[in-house]
Image (spheres, helix red, strand yellow):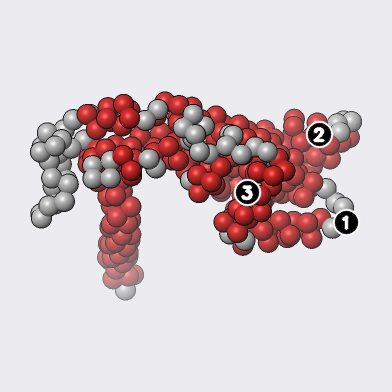
Amino acid sequence: MELARSSRIPAVSARRRTDRLFKNAVFYLVLVVIAMGMVFPFLWIFLTSLKGPTDAIFSVPPQLIPYAPTLDNFKSVLDQLPIGNFFLNSIFVGAVTTLCNVTITALAAYPLAKMKFAGRETIFYLLLATLVVPAQLTYIPSFVLAVNFFHYYNTLAALIFPNLSTAFNVFLLRQAFRSVPNDLIDAARIDGANELRIWWDVLIPVIRPSLATAGIFTFVNMWNDFLWPSLMLHTRDRMTLPVGLAALQGMFSSDMRSIAAGVTMTVIPILIFFMVLQKYFVRGLTGAVKG
C-alpha cells in the first residue's frame, strides 16, 4: 500500500506542474494580447512617420511596414516649426515644476504623516477630496486669476505656478513617510535634530524611490499637458511641445506622414525618460502601497 501511495506522488506532482504551466501560459497569452493592443497604435504612428510618398497610409489590406522608408517627414516638420524651442520650453517647464512640486509636497506630507496636531486627519481628507474634482472645472477661475491678478498670461510661469503642489503627490509621499519606523525619528530627536533636519537627513534618503515616482508622475503630466498650456500660451517662442505641434493639424491637415512624425517626436523622449527611471517608479509605488 505504501508502494502504491509513493507511486501516486510523482503523478500528482506532474499534474500540478502541468496545471501550473497551463495557467502561466494563459496569463502570459492574455498579457501579450493586451500589450500588443496597447503598443500597436504607437507602432503604427512610428512606422507611418517613416513612410515615403509612394507608401499607402490607408489601404486594404493595411500596409504597416514602409516600402521606401525616409526621414523627410521629420525634416519637413523641423523646417516648418521651431521644434527645438518647443523642446526647450517643455523641458524647462517640466524640470522646474517637478523640482518645486516634489519639494513642496514632501514638506507637506511629512507633518501629515509623522507629526501630531489638531485637525491633521481633516486636512488630509480635505486634500484627498480635491482629487475627485476634475481639473477642467478650475480652469475658468484659474484663467481669470492668471490674467487679471497674477498677470502671467502667455508666460511659462503660467504653467509652473498652478502645479507647484498636487494632492496626489502629497498622498503618495505621506504613505511613504508612514512606512518609515518612528524609531529613526525618535533617535534623531534625541540627538538634537530639529524637524527640518530630520526631514532632510533621515527621511528623504529613505523614501527616495517614492520621490522619484512623484517626480516621474509630475514630469510626464507636465510634458503631455495640452489644454491649460493652449489657453495660456499664444506665441510660438513660449509654446511647449504639445501646443506647438497642434499646428501640424493646420499645416499638414492632409499629410498624415508629417503629423505622425510630429507625434513621434513628442512620444519618444518621454518613453525613454520612463524606461530609464522605470525601476524607481515601480519601487516607489510599492513603498506607497505598503505604507
Residue on which the image places disc 1: 118
Q: Using the numbered discs, state the Cα–Cα distance from disc 1 to disc 2 in whole angstroms.
A: 20 Å
Amino acid type assigned to the residue bearing label 3 in the image: Phe
Q: Are circles 1 and 2 on residues that touch, CB within 8 Å?
A: no
- Of callouts 3 and 1, which one flags the residue occurring earlier in the amino acid sequence? 1
Tell me where residue 157 appears, x and y as whole percent.
Answer: 62, 35
Residue in front for this viewpoint, 15 or 192:
192
Image point (38%, 40%), residue name: 247
Amino acid type assigned to the residue bearing label 1 in the image: Ala
Residue 96 visible, this orientation: yes
Answer left or right for 123 relative to 167. Answer: right
Tell me where residue 117 appears, x and y as whole percent.
Answer: 87, 52
Amino acid type assigned to the residue bearing label 2 in the image: Leu
- Of callouts 3 and 2, which one flags the residue occurring earlier in the amino acid sequence? 3
Residue on which the image places disc 2: 196
Q: Using the numbered discs, state the Cα–Cα distance from disc 3 to disc 2 in whole angstroms.
A: 35 Å
Tell me where residue 250 appears, x and y as whole percent.
Answer: 33, 43
Q: Using the numbered discs, state the Cα–Cα distance from disc 3 to disc 1 in whole angstroms.
A: 34 Å
Count neighbours of disc 1 (C-alpha within 10 A) and say few if under 14, some if 14 to 19, many if 20 or more: few
- Nearer to us: label 3 or label 1: 3
Image point (45%, 40%), residue name: 243
- Nearer to us: label 3 or label 2: 3
Answer left or right for 122 relative to 281. Answer: right
Image point (65%, 43%), residue name: 147
Tell me where residue 163 appears, x and y as whole percent.
Answer: 63, 43
Residue 181 visible, this orientation: no
Residue in front for this viewpoint, 8 or 227:
227
Image point (75%, 30%), residue name: 201
Name the element at disc 1: loop
Residue in front for this viewpoint, 122 or 249:
249
